[in-house]
Image: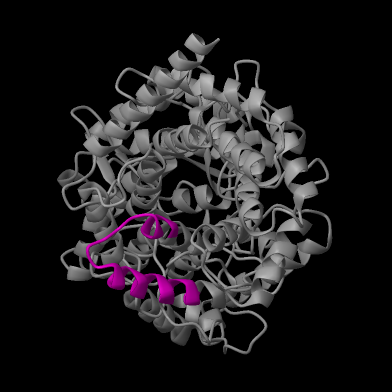
Amino acid sequence: MQTKEIKSQKALAEAIAASKNYLLSIQYPEGYWWAELESNVTITAEVVLLHKIWRTDKTRPLHKAETYLRSQQREHGGWELFYGDGGELSTTVEAYMALRLLGVPASDPALIKAKNFILERGGISKTRIFTKLHLALIGCYDWRGIPSLPPSIMLLPDNFPFTIYEMSSWARGSTVPLLIVCDKKPIYAIDPSITLDELYAEGIGNVRYELPSNHDWTDLFLWLDRGFKLAENFNLVPFREEGLKAAEKWVLERQEPTGDWGGIIPAMLNSLLALRCLNYDVADPIVQKGLEAIDNFAIETEDTYRVQACVSPVWDTAWVIRALVESGLNPSHPALVKGGEWLLSKQILDYGDWAVKNKQGKPGGWAFEFDNRFYPDLDDSAVVVMALAGIELPDERQKQQAIAPGVDWMATMQCKPGGWAAFDLDNDQDWLNLIPYGDLKAMIDPNTADVTARMLEMLGQCNLSMEENRVKRAIAYLIKEQETDGSWFGRWGVNYIYGTSGALSALSLVAPKTYQHNIDRGAAWLISCQNPDGGWGETCRSYNDSSLKGKGVSTASQTAWALIGLLAAHQATGFNVRETVEKGIDYLLSTQQPDGTWYEAEFTGTGFPGHFYIKYHLYQQYFPLIALGRYQKLNL
């Protein structure tokens, strides 16, 4: 027995060392860590469309995008929203559109298969609003079927029940430029010119360009839309020109010096479309910077070209630092120092959109991307503080002077229910998700259990103080969010495994005795959904069907989340997790590759639940290392 234990300890130590060495080997010279943020093919397809509209397609290697798009088509003919989902209609239509724009004929065998897939699911008329909008830009759909967006909403006063600041930051950054686009309703001539008539299941002559009815009170929005369209037809839109000028000004003010808008491709694409509608010249420095920013999100290989929806260097760097510290690396190691100093350089000391509703807070947070001064976020900021607190920098005073305003800013961003959201304060007018334009159901940014848990974990792990009433309200909110089976919902990671891990990590640090029962229930739920192979997995479908919570193919990242939560629970309450944890550790050890890495094909990150998912390519690396490091320290 003792020999077996020694061997297992040796295997654990070797796995930790291999993982640690791999992460150290991929640090960038500037000090940060960064890997691909993979999503579905619509991002690349929409970039192809943008370059065709601007006629900048010849200056980019878009022929390689064809190779990429072909490689992502599945045997059933469609393209996926997330790995293994069986194909998704809107994603497939946009991939088809992009291939046609790249010169692929409709008679191509791949497109014939795609057409059959699309028609079987109802064709273009059944796609999401944003797919139809992109098709309308090139005359492949009629603007009559696109919701009207009156520009005058830009002029609503701050004390009005609704302003653009009641939209989530990502919806706001994408919608304001679309006020211009949807007002102008352009149709651009494209080379090669295409039609997509073959993708209308009812036949092009039978298409009804109208917004779908729900046959309930929400049809009120359809009547309002008809009113807006009637006003547009007679040029009677109130304050139209003033609204368009305000939207243009807003877009120009929010462009980063690097050319980005909001740090996300949808906001960047839509802003450039708005400038095109306003007849900006392609040589205009604003346009050129915007196009170059999109180039910076692209990944080009020898054969392929694809575009990321976002980039995650601050997030990845903070988590890698935490993982390396957990692995036993000296807190003053040069790699950690360099990474920590890079994080300090990325602190945002400018006022952003958050200040519209938060009149008390002063800047001090961190964003997700290289540059995004208007939109620091709470999740990133909390993880950065934990990363910085765990290392030793040559100038510790500078570090503490960065942490303090960061925590102060986060405190002022607490929402009325007691939790924290990702980017905004009290951004919770759920009716916005019911308007026809909001069919992705991502129009708001309410407080969530996972972000709230991260804030509490930061306070507990770093021994930081925050006003006592704030902490009590946050804990009460987190307890209220616990499901009847003991789990927690995960807004930003897939899904209940992610949410439960975060909640257990938080409660185990800030209130282990008071909420032992809640902690033990959460741990018991995690144990109940361990797979026979010792790992954990959860399908993205659990967002649409809660009966699938905790069910799915085992992945390295989700296994690590479960282990992190169980180890936290055991340390806090003594809950017996030994046998379960050992099986989980064995799963990680047995699936680690010779170079110290893990691989998973599944998407375990969440953009918009039910509509947009992400595979963070470093999730499968740093979360397992955290789990292994904590297990080794705890010595169960």
Q: Residue at x 57, y 83 (%)?
A: 236
Q: Main secondary structure of the magenta part?
A: helix
Q: Is residue 513 left or right of residue 170?
A: right
> Is residue 285 found inside the magenta-colored segment of the image?
no
Q: How many marks?
A: 0
Residue 70: x and y, percent?
Answer: 36, 25
In the image, residue 401 sits, relative to residue 294, either above or below, namely below
Q: Looking at the figure, which quarter contains the C terminus? A: top right
- Using the rendered view, name the quadrant where residue 106 is placed: top left
Q: Quadrant of the N terminus?
A: top right
- Residue 286, position in %: x, y? 23, 69
* Front-most of residues 64 and 229: 64
State whether residue 104 appears in this view. no
The answer to whether residue 158 is above or below residue 247 is below
Query: Residue at (78%, 53%) from the top-left corner?
Result: 214
In the picture, measured across the screen, residue 254 lies left or right of residue 588, that is left
Magenta range: 386-409
The answer to whether residue 210 is left or right of residue 359 is right
At 23% from the left edge and 43% from the top edge, which residue is drawn? 27
Residue 588: percent from left, percent from top? 48, 23
Seen from the viewer's position, the closer of residues 145 and 463 is: 463
